[in-house]
Image (cartoon, grey):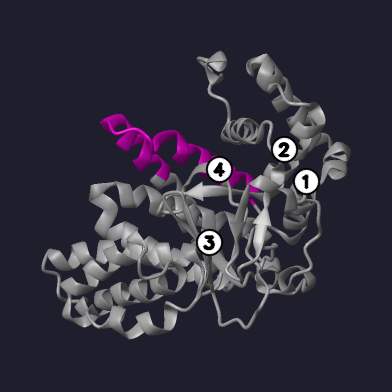
Amino acid sequence: MLREFVPEVPDVTFRLFAKLLYKTHGREFSEFSENLFTGERRTFQDLLDHREDIKESPVVHTRFRTYLAFVLHTFPDNLKPDPDRALRVFGRMIINRFSVQSLYLEPIGEALYIGPSIHDHSCSPDAGFVFDGALLSIRAGRDLVVTDPRQIYICYIDILQTLEDRQSFLKEHYFFRCACPYCTDEQHLINRISAVKESIRDSLRGALTACVHGENESDAVQLDSVYQRARSLIEQDDSDEIALGKESTLKFWKIDALAVAFECAERLPHRRQTEAFKIGLRLLANFKLTYGECRPCVSVLCFRLAVIASEVLSKGNEQNEHELCQIIKDACTRLLATHGKDHPLTRRADCLAQQWPGSRSIIRSFVSHHTSNTTSTH
């Protein structure tokens, strides 16, 4: 059916919508179910569809009508859905879908998980979610005493946005206003991050995306150019703060610039073990301040720094061996908490730890505590 779109490729959300329509055709929504960790059975029928909210939303309803037009054009007559049924499928999908991520948290697709969709949103979540292929695991970020999975909150969005932007996005796409601790306290650190120069964020991210997928020499040149631009912006802002006698302040664009500079430097062999490592440490400090200590993005960044640290050690640089081993240990500890002992990244971190005497004991020390923190795995 999707051959009708050649040479265009339908977006990932439409492909999920088409798949759900095909899978549920002629069947009751209650036939599709998953069991929660409490033993409760949750079905596709249980998911909210927000039909009335969607009809009142120009953006979301326009998207639905566009998707429906594509479906009615491409599906054979015996599979064409009733518009009302299509809206009920669309609503359940658009509200409850997850962005499937690579091991390094890059979006690679979308999927609907009936069980995990029970968790509501908080900008200050109790748990985080990670993927191993299509396997989704949700793990508590702190000790919880709950009997109902509805009491466990996850985060639907990137919280590195202004309070106004977070609330607007959640209202427009999920039809609710967040009342979490971050959103009810205007003086919270996350709400005091400067939102100046926001256009820089999109510009840098767009430039990075445009050149990271290639493997030829010209792509490396473009990547280095993006790196130089990001680093120049960071250094100029650092100089301005020093000249004005101001303490360093958190800025959304600057955190993104650090992230872009790190992504570029990590991919460039001549910058990997020097610039990438230094920038990565600075980015990690910003991540800990904003996202918190026990979040998957912090653990993954720690792991990436640990890999670079192991390369530095492998080259015989013993000057900072203790510090580098501590970074490897820190990655192991965090991955155990956020990803679990069986996740591929945790196993890779374990392999790194085994290479250096100062890191070998870390897995054994933390397994007994962190293996109990998985709240639901699907």
Q: Disc 3 or disc 1, which is closer to the eye?
A: 1
Task: Compare residues 92 and 77 and report the one nearer the observer.
Answer: 77
Q: Position of residue 67 (x, y in %)?
A: 70, 27
Q: Which residues are magenta?
A: 197-226
Against 44, is 19 above or below?
A: above
**Magenta stretch, main secondary structure class:** helix
Q: Residue at x 41, y 49 (%)?
A: 133
The secondary element bearing badge 3 is classed as strand
Q: Which residue is mark 4?
A: 110
Which is more N-terminal, label 3 or label 2? 2
Q: Disc 4 or disc 2, which is closer to the eye?
A: 2
Crowding at mark 2 (Cα within 10 Å: few <14, some 14-19, many 20+): many
Which is more N-terminal, label 4 or label 1? 1
- Residues under labels 2 and 1: Cα distance? 7 Å
Q: Amino acid at mark 4?
A: Glu
The secondary element bearing badge 4 is classed as strand
Q: Are marks 2 and 1 in contact (CB under 8 Å)?
A: yes
- Please state if 85 lies on the left or on the right of 332 as rendered: right
Which is more N-terminal, label 1 or label 2? 1
Q: Amino acid at mark 2?
A: Phe
Q: Are marks 3 and 4 in contact (CB under 8 Å)?
A: no
Q: Which residue is mark 3?
A: 129
Q: Which residue is mark 1?
A: 49
- Please state if 10 lies on the left or on the right of 326 as rendered: right
- Residues under labels 3 and 4: Cα distance? 14 Å
> Can you see residue 349?
yes
